[in-house]
Amino acid sequence: MNDNADLRPSRSASSDALRVSFEFFPPKTAEVEPVLWETIQRLAPLKPDFVTVTYGAGGSTRERTLATLERITRDTGLHAAGHLTCVGATRDEVDDVIRSYQAAGIRHIVALRGDPQGGVGERYIPHPHGYATTADLVRGIRAIGEFDVTVSAYPEKHPESTSLDADLDVLKAKIDAGATRAITQFFFDNELYFRYLDRALARGISIPLLPGILPVQNFHQTANFAAKTGATIPAWLADRFDGLDHDPATRRLIAASVAAEQAFDLLDHGISNFHFYTMNRAELTFAICHLLGIRQKGERRAA
Ligand code: FAD
């Protein structure tokens, strides 16, 4: 059975059936650290299934990612998952990070290859002494300890991929290596995601493929990011933010309504498991969860 079809309440179903998870990135400087902790404190009472902390390709955030994971675990008790990339690192270096997660009590890793070192669009060259593919990394993680391993999925295919089928083969290889869940790249056209779920199911993929929802904090930044990652920006989305460059208050209202519409449409199609790219900001993610009926513990109500 497909776990994605398993969680399909109607829009009127109890919000107890809804599950959310949140992505954060480690703060770049001490000055912006309080912003992250305020965000986490605001979102923690929503009792996410798990929260994740990104990892800079090549290990650039290694210490900060670990420190953030440790503090989340210590101060909030939330289930924290550490991202990990294998680009530009030897197997020993990557294994050291896995062991440092293990020593910190982290039992869930989001395993990724990472972008080519020359940047998106360049050819990916595995480190000669490193993990060659994400599937190899997943196997390496599972060999070290009892980790729950999540991987990425691309409803519009990864930009380096020759076809969606080739991309699904890569996802299947990661699952065969031990991944138990995938989080998708963000998308704005839900039809692309529904079609992807059908193709994945036809390919024999039955693990949960959580939709990655990106509340649009900044339209131009999102459009740039989308161009790099191969995600489509629909014309209607650009139109909604048109003319609002100097009107942040209206932009926030539009962003909340866009993400809420997307989430409700997913819900109407039986999807009840959402992963939010918070960009370390609580406001939009909190508002969308509230609209979905996800409240602080003891306050959940029907959506
Ligand atoms: P994979 O899914 O392993 O592969 C991506 C593509 O590479 C494949 O579709 C295919 O085209 C090609 N490929 C891979 N293996 C093979 C093979 N054996 N043969 C032929 N082609 C192959 N980046 C970071 O630096 N840090 C993060 O914390 C981070 N978090 C992310 C979280 C999510 C949910 C997502 C969706 C992405 C994240 N990324 C992160 C970005 C990610 O590192 C890049 O998209 C990267 O280019 C691909 O890594 P991957 O693990 O998704 O690749």
Image (cartoon, rainbow, N blue to C red):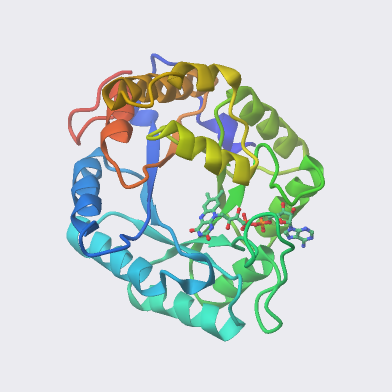
Left of 92 or right of it: where is 205? right
Along the line of sight, which residue is nearer the eye, 176 or 73?
73
Give residue 250's position: percent from left, percent from top: 31, 19
| The image quarter in which residue 234 lies | top right
Quadrant of the frame with the N terminus: top right
Tell me: residue 92, above or below residue 31.
below
Along the line of sight, which residue is nearer the eye, 90 or 31?
31
Tell me: residue 227, above or below residue 216.
below
| The image quarter in which residue 285 lies | top left
Kindly tell me whether residue 178 is visible in this rendering: yes
Along the line of sight, which residue is nearer the eye, 100 or 238?
238
Give residue 166's position: percent from left, percent from top: 80, 48
Give residue 170's position: percent from left, percent from top: 73, 54
Left of 202 or right of it: where is 6? left
Tell me what residue is drawn at x 30 percent, y 27 percent: 248
Give residue 290's position: percent from left, percent from top: 27, 26
Tell me what residue is drawn at x 28 percent, y 54 percent: 78
Tell me: residue 86, above or below residue 196.
below
Quadrant of the frame with the C terminus: top left
Kindly tell me whether residue 209 is visible in this rendering: no
